[in-house]
Image (spheres, rainbow, N blue to C red):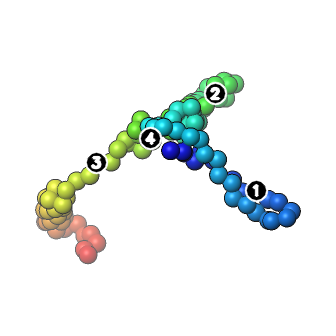
Amino acid sequence: MSCESARLLKVTNESGIQPLSFYVPRKSDAFQTDIFPNTASSEPAHTCEEWWSGSSKGPELETLNPNKRGGAQNGGKKKLLSVGTLSASLKKAEARIKYLEGRLDASGISYDKK
């Protein structure tokens, strides 16, 4: 088993552009931290006050391991809901909207009816 670790295009005078792939032989499908080390995250390392005062911290790092990702920026794994759960939630929301529209009508407040 081998894992592609990089892909690039090589430009030559004779044959134009050639795609090159680099493979690393591996015996496992597990995530390989030696091939994919931690990388800079989208979270800021400084507050604006720290930056203005001259702080020189390194970037915040995050893992590339898909099993360990899911911090504050993307809320972790998505929770999938069943059709029944979504239908019940929709009926509840529609009932709430009807109730609130009734309150608006009773108070004489105009709104955009669709």
The answer to whether any part of residue 60 appears in the image is: yes
Asked if disc 1 and disc 4 are in contact, CB closer than 8 Å, the reply is: no
Nearest to the eye among marks 1 and 4: give it: 4
Q: Is label 3 in contact with label 1 (beta carbons under 8 Å)?
A: no
Instruction: Give the mark nearest the N terminus, 2 or 1.
Output: 1
Q: 11 or 1: nearer the eye?
A: 1
CA distance for labels 4 and 2: 32 Å
Where is residue 8? Give x, y as percent: 69, 53
Select label 2 or label 3 by which is in front: 3
- Residue 15 shown left or right of residue 42 in the figure: right
Say which amino acid is labelled 2: Gly
Q: Is residue 33 above or below residue 20?
A: above
Residue 25 quadrant? top right
Give the distance between the C-alpha atoms of the residues marked 2 and 3, in whole angstroms.
34 Å
Question: x, y percentage for residue 73?
Answer: 45, 41
Q: Nearer the viewer, mark 2 or mark 1?
A: 1
| Amino acid, disc 3 | Lys
Is residue 75 depicted above or below 15 in this figure? above
Q: Which residue is mark 3?
A: 79
Residue at left 64%, top 47%? 22
Question: In terms of sequence position, does the residue under pointer 1 or pointer 4 come before the other?
Answer: 1
User: What separation in Å lies between label 3 and label 1 (alpha carbons)?
Assistant: 43 Å
Mark 2 lies on residue: 58
